[in-house]
Image (cartoon, rainbow, N blue to C red):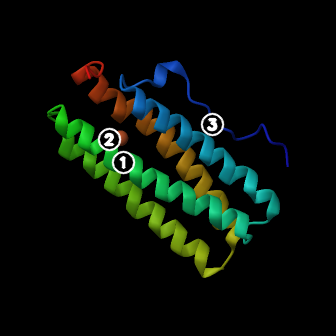
């Protein structure tokens, strides 16, 4: 499988003005690439399961950090933003359950990767960008 096809990279335009969150976004996209690469072991392999679980755990940690940041900065649209995050958690959990059920793992994994790639790149560039525009760079 060619490695270069569906990889995700963080670019400087994706900054949200807070170095820890930027680093987390970079790490998330790198971890998504790891999920994609782990498919070489087969969709039902322990490598895939481990990479998917790590992605989910790290994503949850990141979303909690980001929500605390928005709250600390008094971001006006925090509730709307938190609903986006909850949609992600719900959809991720659904995919993970389907994957663990063992039915058509290749198909589920492909759908999950498309969803994760699209959700995270769009979320960072649109929704996260909104709080950067509203709040400016972090001051501490
Ligand atoms: Fe966000």
Q: Does the numbered disc 2 mark a residue whose Cβ is under 8 Å from ligand 1?
A: yes
- Horizontal side of 99 relative to 127 (left or right) equals right
Q: Does the numbered disc 3 mark a residue whose Cβ is under 8 Å from ligand 1?
A: no
Q: Residue at x 68, y 49 (%)?
A: 34
* Circle nearer the N terminus (1, 3): 3
Q: Badge 2 is on which residue? A: 66
Q: Callout 3: 10 Å neighbours few (<14), some, many (20+)?
A: some
Of residue 65 and residue 6, the one placed in the foreground of this image is 65
Q: Badge 3 is on which residue? A: 8
Q: Callout 1: 10 Å neighbours few (<14), some, many (20+)?
A: some
Quadrant where the C terminus sits is top left
Q: Badge 1 is on which residue? A: 63
Q: Residue at x 61, y 47 (%)?
A: 32
Q: Position of residue 121 (x, y in %)?
A: 50, 37
Q: Does the numbered disc 1 mark a residue whose Cβ is under 8 Å from ligand 1?
A: yes
Q: Residue furthest right?
A: 1
């Amino acid at each position: 499988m060619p490695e270069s096809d569906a990889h995700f990279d963080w670019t400087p335009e994706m900054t949200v003005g807070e170095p820890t969150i930027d680093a987390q976004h970079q790490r998330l996209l790198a971890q998504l690439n790891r999920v994609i690469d782990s498919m070489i072991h087969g969709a039902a392999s322990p490598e895939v399961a481990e990479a998917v679980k790590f992605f989910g755990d790290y994503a949850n940690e990141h979303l909690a950090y980001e929500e605390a940041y928005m709250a600390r900065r008094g971001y006006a649209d925090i509730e709307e933003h938190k609903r986006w995050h909850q949609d992600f958690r719900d959809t991720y959990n659904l995919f993970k359950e389907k994957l663990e059920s063992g039915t058509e793992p290749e198909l589920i994994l492909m759908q999950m990767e498309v969803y994760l790639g699209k959700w995270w790149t769009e979320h960072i560039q649109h929704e996260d960008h909104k709080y950067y525009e509203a709040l400016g760079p972090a001051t501490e």
